[in-house]
Image: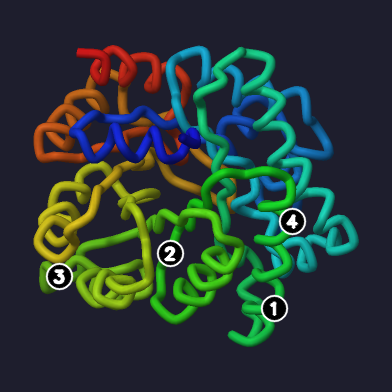
Amino acid sequence: MSRYSELMQRIRAGECILIDGATGTEIERRGVPQLDNAWNGGGALSHPEILRTVHEDYLRLGAEIIISNTFATHYYALRDACEAERFEQYNRRGIELAIEARDSTQKSNALVAGGISYWSWSGNHPTLEDLKSATERQVEIIADARAELFMLEMMIDIDKMLILLDAARSTGLPVWVGFTCEVNAQGVVCLRNREPLSDALAAIEDRQVDLVNIMHTDVEDIDVCLDVVQSDWSGPVGVYAHSGVSVDHRWIFDNTISPADYCAAARRWIDRGVRVIGGCCGIEPRHIEQLAKLVEK
């Protein structure tokens, strides 16, 4: 049985699985410089030792899934950063460093997930057809580098999400979809582009998605998001929230949630049936260390 099959068997049996915390903001916090218009995607080539160490830290703390630092390495972000010629290198090395971290920590049962997104820091969005062809190439590279799972991250609109989902599924690897949500003035839980979360869940119903995550979403909004997910989605659910704010694309860590308060929220989510728990931007190893104790109980 594959690592992934074993993990899904445990999830379906009711276990809660710990994933990692932030990678992009964590390498930023440790001094890795940003790429203009590609955020913290440069670490795999500019500072591979720091990125590898971040993965190792999360694995040693008990994370069973680590997500590659490829959220910001889709073709159009790298094009806007004048790094398009290294598109394959960034994506391949991002996976390789996560695998190296797993090997060095001897956490042989941990899964390496390839994170993909379509977020733009420049505001220069490709056509849907161009996004499709670029994503198909990205997922081929990531799959060839031996990722075991695709994590769609910061899905904020349905049409682009479906393009990434279909491309990732074409590799034969399993896919989890991560939605970033807000509550609008009418109290409706929406994707960040204002489409209702319920519509997004309906759009993936027959597309063989194994798990839905609410991710890169404010801690205080998670419970109302879970209300919608647990009403409209029959499969397993995960949460990895964020804490803090971004100013000029740089994360501000001064007011991030304490590990104790994050764990208190996570306990509530787990009691509601969440089966995968971790953290996104601003959530550091110190938070994951406390989450590990919660998951072990």
- Tell which circle, 1 or 2, labels the residue nearer the N-terminal end: 1
Judging from the image, what secondary structure is the residue with disc 1 in? Answer: helix
Say which label, 3 or 2, has the lower sequence index: 2
Q: Which one is closest to the eye, mark 2 or mark 4?
A: 4
In this view, the residue in front, 177 or 30, is 177
Is the residue marked by circle 1 packed among few (<14), some (14-19), or many (20+) residues within 10 Å? few
- Residue at 14% over, 66% down: 232
**Label 1: which residue?**
133
Q: What secondary structure is marked by label 3?
A: loop
Residue to which mark 3 is pinned: 188
Q: Which percent across, then down, holds residue 127?
A: 63, 87
- Callout 4 crowding tier (Cα within 10 Å): few <14, some 14–19, many ≥20: many
Residue at coordinates 36% horizontally, 67% vertically from top-left?
A: 192
Mark closer to the chain start, 4 or 3? 4
Which residue is pictured at 33% across the width and 51% down the height?
Answer: 213
Residue beneath disc 4: 141
Q: How far across and how far down the image is residue 2, in percent?
A: 49, 36
Q: Position of residue 45 (x, y in %)?
A: 83, 39
Marks 1 and 3, the one that precedes in the sequence: 1
At 65% from the left and 49% from the top, the residue drawn is 70
Tell me the kind of residue under disc 4. Ile
- For residue 155, which numbered disc appears in the image? 2
Asked if the residues shown at circle 3 and circle 2 are in contact, with their CB atoms under 8 angstroms apart, the answer is no
Extreme-front residue of the structure: 1
Kind of residue sitting beneath label 3: Val
